[in-house]
Image (tube, grey):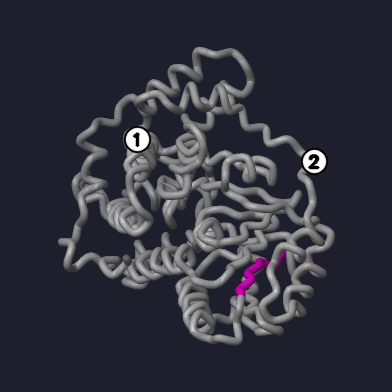
Amino acid sequence: MSEFLITEVRGHVGFITLNQPKALNALSLDMVRSLTQALLAWEHDPAIEAVAIRGTSKLGNFGGFCAGGDIRFFHQAVLGGDPALEDFFTEEYALNHQIHRYPKPYIAFMDGIVMGGGMGISQGTRFRLVTANTKMAMPETHIGLFPDVGGGYFLSRCPGSTGEWLALTGAVLNAQGALELGLADHCLDASRLDAAWQALGSLPAGAGLAPWLAEYAATPTAPSGVAREFIDRVFSLASAPEMLQALEAEVDDWSQHTAATLRHRSPLMLHVVLEQVRRARAMGLADDLRMERDMVRHCFYTAHLGRSGAASETVEGIRALAVDKDHRPRWNPMRVEDVTPEMVAPFFVSPWPPHAHPLRALG
């Protein structure tokens, strides 16, 4: 078991705590394997009726859920030729699928930062619980990646064109925004999370969760800030350049800020992500995850562009954000208008035949 993942059983509930607060509970391969192992064991244990997961922060047992995968590991693994990188994505996506199909109630305390891989281990749960502290996003285009861990599947099912908006911009949602867009189920009182966590372990066998939820529920007070009408109008356009043109033609602060955000993202990956979300609308979860497994291989080894390793969009994006921290990524191409269909299409061609795909067993 990973030293950064704590499991325990109290009463009829299995409890999981992500315990790497200095790294915002970023997921490592060991953590993915430990979480998978615990879920498999509890799935077949008749004494366990539900599973709950939370993250720790520097302030205590709550305040931070999970900021995603360990992107510094991604950077080091690519440059060092570490094959564990391939294992990480295969096993993480298999875990995401396992959570979506888990047969017992799975309760995610999505307090604090819930981003990237943190969404992957929470969006498939039956009870997605947010608080006034929740900051939810899929910000992968900021590092030249795409919203993986099933992001194509769950973002494409957000209402209207909000999935495209979230995927392209990495916009951060609060509790109300998450509830409005179908990415959360209930809001809890942040000041009573410890009590709610403890109370789960005291529920009698066969007890439903409705009374427990009612006891600790809260109503979000901050508005979502999601401009649905404008988002749907702009992000339903056919291409990323058209979206930028529409935004830059407006004079309001929201449009100008959104346009500036997109201009800072990887131009290539804006095109790839838009294609991902729109393809995923017609896909089931397993097919979406297989597509994303193909895509992530191409992100680090973009053979059709003659680029890999340090020259890839993703490694360059991680370098600029988390390694050198100069926040000046050298994207290639530099402008969204310069990306061609020939650059985008190969991301959706699998490097494996169906019988050898690393996620071929997903049902």
Three-letter residue code for mark 2: Thr
Toward which corner of the image does residue 75 lie, by quadrant? Answer: bottom left
Q: Position of residue 154 (x, y in %)?
A: 47, 49
Q: Which residue is mark 2?
A: 221
Is residue 32 toward the left or the right of residue 298 in the image?
A: right
Q: Are marks 1 and 2 in contact (CB under 8 Å)?
A: no
Q: Residue at x 79, y 51 (%)?
A: 218
Marks 1, 2: nearer the viewer = 2
Magenta-highlighted residues:
50-59
Whole-percent x, y for residue 259 in the image: 51, 25
**Residue 297 image point, x, y percent:** 29, 57
Vertically, is 88 above or below 322?
below
Residue 54 magenta-highlighted:
yes
Name the foreground residue: 209 vs 41: 209
User: Could you tell me which residue is drawn at 67 percent across and 32 percent down?
Assistant: 225
Q: Which mark is residue 292?
A: none
SS of the residue under disc 2: loop
Looking at the picture, which amino acid does disc 1 mark? His
Residue under pointer 1: 271
Q: Main secondary structure of the magenta part?
A: strand
Identify the residue shown where x is 65% and y is 77%.
15
Q: Hey, which quadrant is residue 241 in on the image?
A: top left
Packing grade of label 2 (10 A; few <14, some 14-19, many >=20) is few
Q: Quadrant of the C terminus?
A: bottom left
SS assignment at label 1: helix
Which of the two residues, 361 or 64, is positioned nearer the viewer here? 361
Q: Is residue 224 visible?
A: yes
